[in-house]
Image (cartoon, rainbow, N blue to C red):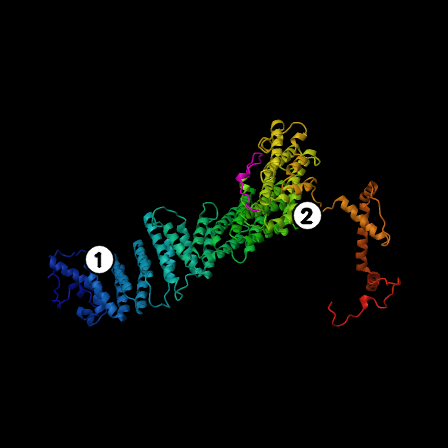
Amino acid sequence: MPGTLPSFPSLPRGMTVPALLSSLPRGVTMPSLPRGVTMPTLPEAPRRLLQDCCSVFDHQTSGGVCGCCWALRPRYKRLVDNIFPEDPEDGLVKANMEKLTFFALSAPEKLDRIAAYLSERLTRELNRHRYGYVCIALEAMEQLLLACHCQSINLLVESFLSTLRLLLEAEKPHLHILATNSFVKFANIEEDTPSYHRSYDFFVSRFSEMCHSDHEDPDTKIKIRVSGICGLQGVVRKTVDDELQVNIWEPRHMEQIVPALLVNLEHCHSNSGSPAEQTEVCFRELLGRAAYGHINNAIKPVLMHLDSHSLWGGGGFAVRCFQIIMFSIQSQHSHLVIQQLLGHLDANSRSPASIRAGIVEVLSEAAVIEATGSVGPTVLEVFNTLLRQLRQSVDYQLTGYYDNAGKHRTTSVHEKTLQDAVIKTIGSFANTLPVYQRSEVMLFIMGKIPVPGIYPALGSPNAGFEGSRMIQVMLLKSLLQVSERYESSNLLTALPSSFLEPLLSFTLMEDPEIRLLVLSILTSLIDRHQNAPRITTVSVTFDVSVLEQKEDGCSRHDNLFIRKHAQRLYRHVYLACKEENNGPNHYQALFSLLAVLSVELINEEVLVDLLRLILALQELGASNQENLSVFNRCSLHAVCAASLHLLSQLGPPPALHQHVTQVIESRQKDAPHLLPENVLCDQPRLPKADLKVDKAFLFIQSKICEALIGSSYSAQCERLSTPYTPQLTDEDRLSRKMSIADTVSLQMAIDHASTSDPQKPQIEQITFETLKNTIEDRGAVEEEERRKRMEVVERFQTAPFEEIAALCGSRTSLLQSKLDQVFDLIVRPPPSPSGQSSRRSTPIFEMKFPDLCVY
């Protein structure tokens, strides 16, 4: 009869229709209705029976008797089928799930079959787009994973992971998110037994791809990216602590994970759960688990990503990224990051200045964070790399190109930005070092500064004088950065001779910027109580109470420093004041240096020496022997007034302060141009005519001596009455020229030694004509000496060997005869009482000493 349903036999006890429908033989399908034929309307009971039949045909099983009879099917399959409800919206049948879990725990050898059957059911539902049943099957597998901790769990995991792969390969975004959440739950499970054959390569690749999602719906895109980040975090947790798992730190994995994280880290959102927030958490966890040998593999993709996306420039993303890195890794591994950045800086030495400046800025910020760790074993290599970048930048600034081919142009503005960044970074690195290493760094930088005639010029050969000058300025600025935070209680350690002598030589340079930098460096190294920032202006009303003074006297180390270096320091201060191109900043720096010297090294001897130096500077400004400008002379008087006013408050008798105050008041009334407030300002008030200083406006040496008499300074008054004269030495490394008097004296000594009889010395009178003739004949003497040297060179190049040997032999014989004469005079026996000298047959120097004689 058409339109009627086939009849079914009655079901066995305890069996339901859905369970029976799932046991039809494999290959049996529900026949489709012909085109145009529809299912007739049925009552409720027949319609429910028809649905049960369809369910039987959908859930096909293997052939055989067991496939046809539901009661004869394996128990694990029946238990799995029972967890699926009739309506997927009802969710997992919890009671039946508990039965399945109990069965799996009781018979763990069936876990692999249970997992395989669940995977089969999930695959079938996925192919039929019944996503509700897909979620139920996946939830069941998750609960089995959480409940089963035994050796057979590895078989369950393999089926579970294959199911996740299937979901991640689907086209539906919600399935990707579902699979990722399930993987994260699995990653948090601590397994009892290791797995030797499990691979996560697919998941690393797929989760990294999800982090780059570009879905058209913004909300969906964010969900997919956050899900991908969580998946990567799960992979890291599952593999990083298990040496038997896949090595997640291999470059092929890091090159996928790190860029995926950095792409999302660029997009900053304030709301919770954003990709940037999740990325930072994952990135910190990844780096926090990195061991010593894994740091380089984790940092290299970061550098490559910043290069490929041009992120070294503005915006601060590179700085933020490395701040996360430095705060996340273990502190003892920080120097590896620094070394990676230095190597990357060298690799980009021919890149645009903006890229180099960005890398240097990152280095500076990383050095500040890395202060708790260590720069590593190659401390000087760090500074060598930075100084090399400075020299290259100077070359690029002079040539206008940052490549050898001359194709890529650069500008002075960009290169100066880079140079400032490098100098700042040098200071940041130096501040992370202990005191003894900072001293080594300062010596290292000093050795790199080119000095004409002493050290070879650094940089390219085409840089010339201007290039050397620019390098000198850059390196001195770097030195100032290091010295500003240098703290040492021992000045002999802070200013050793190997460092102080070349530094003082720069005070004689013609370049005013170099001299100003040297004065600032000296002030920062001598100032151990941070008083220099308090001395903001040169003033005759300065109150010493604002300065931090030493409670005790000079220490033993300070006294040694004074005896060893004080006179040399005074000499260069005096010579620096004679330069014509000094500006207001130079006189401010000179006053700060004198003030710091007064506070740090004050004692009777130093105070008298400073008084003598200040009086000599006053005489220099009053006499104008050096043809200084009116501004320079007025500035010298102003510095002398301010320095004496400060010195008079540091312990001398009140009479000295009274004399200084009287002179200052006289200048305020009738000579304001001799005070710092009117000279060292934006609009100095200078006399229109030539400067003439009345005696009433000068500090008198005799009155200063009278003020010191009767105090502890009385013993030093005799020295104060002697005018200060700088010592004439050959320390001037810039010119290396001897004075005329030294040249004449040397020439006269040579002539005297060659012509005079040793027993009858001749005394030659030095007159004006002698000096004049010596100066005029100097050219002829030099020509004669040069000719003699050429003759010697030519003789040794062309003469036969026998002639050279005979010449050397004759000189040897002459030398031996002279030595015999000397020894004869030395070993002459003492006179005898009879007045007759008895000569020994054997000279003393030829006597054979006994064997037991100690000599």
Left or right position of 423 against 838: left
Going by the image, does 4 lie left or right of 790? left
Q: On the picture, is 638 further left or further right than 238? A: right
**Disc number placed over residue 91 in the picture, else none:** 1
Magenta stretch: give its range.
Answer: 535-552
- Vertical position of residue 604 compared to residue 42: above or below: above
User: Which one is nearer the viewer's eye here, 820 or 465?
Assistant: 820
Dot 2 lies on which element? loop
> At which x and y percent is residue 278?
36, 52
Q: Can residue 110 be spotted in the picture?
A: yes
- Where does label 2 land, which residue? 733
Name the quarter where the C terminus is drawn. bottom right
Local crowd at mark 2 within 10 Å, few (<14), some, or many (≥20)? some
Q: Who is closer to the viewer here, 718 or 845?
A: 718
Pick whichever of labels 1 and 2 is earlier in the sequence.
1
Q: Is residue 179 magenta?
A: no
Percent x, y of residue 243: 40, 65
